[in-house]
Structures are given as structure tokens and as C-alpha cells.
Image (cartoon, rainbow, N blue to C red):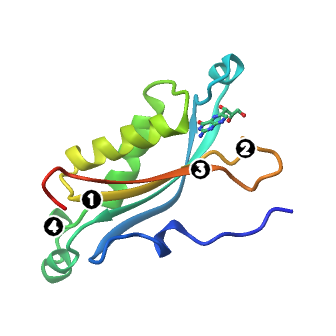
Amino acid sequence: MKTESKSVFNQTPFSGDLVLVEGLEVPAVIGIFDWEQDIQQPLVVDVAVVWDNRIPAASGSIDDALDYDRLSRAIQDWIQEKPYGLIEEVAEVLADRILHEFKVAAVQLKVAKPTAVKAARSVAVQITRYTEGAN
Ligand SMILES: Nc1nc2c(c(=O)[nH]1)N=C([C@H](O)[C@@H](O)CO)CN2
């Protein structure tokens, strides 16, 4: 029987503020088998990005915030721009691009492939990556 599990956000190693996107479902060409390259399967992404939220809280300006709309759209675009094999590849691409394009110090993300193993509610990889010199 499939059971609920805790969100990735209860387990981040980061001590400060975060911006979070949880359960972002993106259709993808993903998988190591030939047949998987001919279909789309959902990936579900959870992301936690280190960001000082005191600054946008004080200014009220989206320019000071890590815009979760922009982050979500970027993740969707990066997943859909090409076919992938392993979900590990997707996770590394997303982490690298988030660090560089959003200029953040650290990111933790989980990429799940809920339809991959019939008996499991989901399978996933989770990684934590830092901008060089930031940790
Ligand atoms: N660690 C991983 N294991 C497996 C992956 C993966 O991406 N990472 N992928 C597959 C297949 O694509 C599978 O999902 C097809 O059902 C198997 N194991």
C-alpha cells in the first residue's frame, strides 16, 4: 500500500530563509529505456532555495524577492527543452542552472518520477548543491 511521506522541506540542511516550490509537476521525456524516449511521463520537483526574505519583506518589492513564478517557469522550460535518461541528470541540470541563473548560494531539490515503480507511491533523487565559495 502506498503511504504518505514527509515533505523534503522538513529536512533541508539550511539554517536561514528559504523560497520553496513544492510538487511542481512537469511532463518530461525521461528514462533509460528506448520506449521511454517515445512518451512523456510526469516528473515532480520540490525545490528549496536559500534567500534572505527580510529584504523583500521590508521593501514589498518583487525585485528583492526570489520570484517563485519565474523559478517555476524556468524549471518547467529546462525539463522540457530536451530528453533525459536518469532523473539524476535532471537534478544536476536544475541545480546548476538555479545556482547560476538565479544567483543563489545554495539549493536543495528533489526530482521524483511517480509512475516509474508501480508498487511505490514515488521514486526520487534528492541533491543539495552550493555556489562555489558560498558554504
Ligand atoms: N537511480 C535511478 N534508477 C533508475 C532510473 C533513474 O533515473 N535513476 N530510471 C530507471 C528507468 O528509466 C525506469 O524509471 C523505467 O521504469 C530505472 N532506475
Checking the image for residue 69, the label placed there is none
Q: Which residue is mark 1?
A: 106
Could you tell me residue 129's position as x and y percent? 32, 52
Q: Closer to the N terminus: mark 1 or mark 4? A: 4
Q: Amino acid at mark 2?
A: Thr
Q: Which residue is mark 3?
A: 124
**Depth-wise, is mark 3 or mark 2 nearer the camera?**
3
Asked if the residue at label 3 sits under 8 Å from ligand 1, the reply is: no
Residue 98 locus on image (x, y percent): 29, 48
Disc 4 target residue: 64
* Distance between mark 3 and mark 4 Cα atoms: 32 Å
Tell me which numbered mark, 2 or 1, is placed earlier along the sequence: 1
Look at the picture and state if 55 lies above or below 41.
below
Identify whether 86 is placed above or below 61.
Answer: above
Residue at (59% x, 50% y) in the render: 124
- Disc on the earlier residue, 3 or 1: 1
